[in-house]
Image (tube, rainbow, N blue to C red):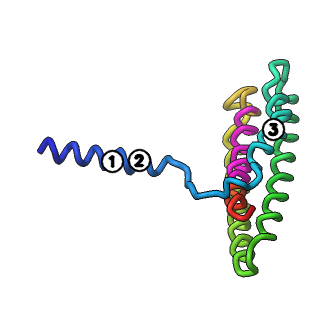
């Protein structure tokens, strides 16, 4: 009985770790490091967001600028990735992106409706900004990883 219990615990631990690990693929080690370049460019936005002198409006403006930056990076990366794909795979990527946009919009609606000033005080701006920008950044990172296979 004890060995069976230990086996189940081990299998559960493996299953949980697999669920929380990122997808990995073998990338070309000679490809340009797009993620490092992105992280360098994003620093100015993160610094503006984390400015201790920020009031609520400053935080909202900083997150807005960051999301514009993320969206531009996402569109640029999507276009570059699409250019590397066959016509069939381009259609699949487009379909995937359209589904992601629907997901993003639904998440944004939930975020904006849930995190409001009456319930969360002035921290609502941080929560809204952080959660919504993370959605865009996560998609961007996924596209960077896809693109690394073609560079």
Within 10 Å of disc 1 (Cα), the crowding (few <14, some 14-19, many 20+) is few
- Magenta stretch bounds: 126-141
Q: Which residue is at 77% across, 52% downward?
A: 32
Residue at 70%, 58% in the rendered image: 148
Categorize mark 2 by other alpha carbons within 10 Å: few (<14), some (14-19), many (20+): few
Give the left or right position of residue 58, taking residue 1 as reference.
Answer: right
In the drawing, does residue 24 fall left or right of residue 18? Answer: right
Is residue 106 visible in this depiction of the protein? no
- Which numbered dot is residue 40? 3
Expressed as whole percent of the image width and height from the top left, the position of residue 142 reads 67, 55
Which dot, 2 or 3, sits closer to the camera?
3
- Relative to 52, does residue 41 appear above or below in the rendering? below
Look at mark 1 in the image and give the residue it sits on: 12
Do residues under tags 2 and 1 come within 8 Å of each other at their CB atoms?
yes
Inspect the magenta stretch and tell me whether residue 12 lies in it: no
For label 3, the crowd category at 10 Å Cα-Cα, with few meaning under 14, some 14 to 19 and many 20 or more, is: few
Residue 82's tag is none
Residue behind mark 2: 16
Which one is in front in this view, the residue at disc 3 or the one at disc 1? Answer: 3
Which SS class for mark 1? Answer: helix
Q: Residue at x 83, y 52 (%)?
A: 73
Residue 98, quarter of picture: bottom right
Q: Position of residue 129 (x, y in %)?
A: 76, 38
Q: How many marks?
A: 3
135 in magenta: yes
Q: Are marks 3 and 1 in contact (CB under 8 Å)?
A: no
Please, what secondary structure does the residue beneath circle 3 have?
Answer: helix
SS assignment at label 2: helix
Q: Write the residue at 77% across / 65% down.
A: 81
Mainly helix, strand or loop, the magenta region?
helix
Mark 3 and mark 1: Cα distance apart in space: 38 Å
């Amino acid at each position: 009985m004890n060995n069976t219990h230990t086996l189940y615990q081990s299998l559960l631990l493996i299953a949980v770790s697999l669920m929380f690990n990122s997808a990995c693929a073998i990338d070309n080690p000679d490809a340009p490091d797009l993620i490092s370049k992105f992280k360098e460019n994003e620093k100015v936005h993160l610094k503006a967001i984390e400015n201790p002198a920020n009031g609520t409006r400053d935080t909202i403006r900083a997150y807005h600028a960051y999301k514009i930056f993320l969206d531009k990076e996402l569109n640029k990366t999507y276009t570059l990735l699409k250019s590397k794909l066959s016509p069939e795979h381009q259609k699949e990527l487009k379909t995937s992106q359209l589904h992601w946009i629907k997901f993003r919009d639904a998440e944004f609606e939930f975020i904006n409706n849930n995190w409001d000033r009456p319930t969360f005080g002035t921290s609502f701006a941080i929560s809204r900004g952080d959660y919504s920008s993370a959605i865009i950044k996560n998609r961007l990172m996924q596209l960077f990883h896809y693109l690394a296979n073609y560079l």
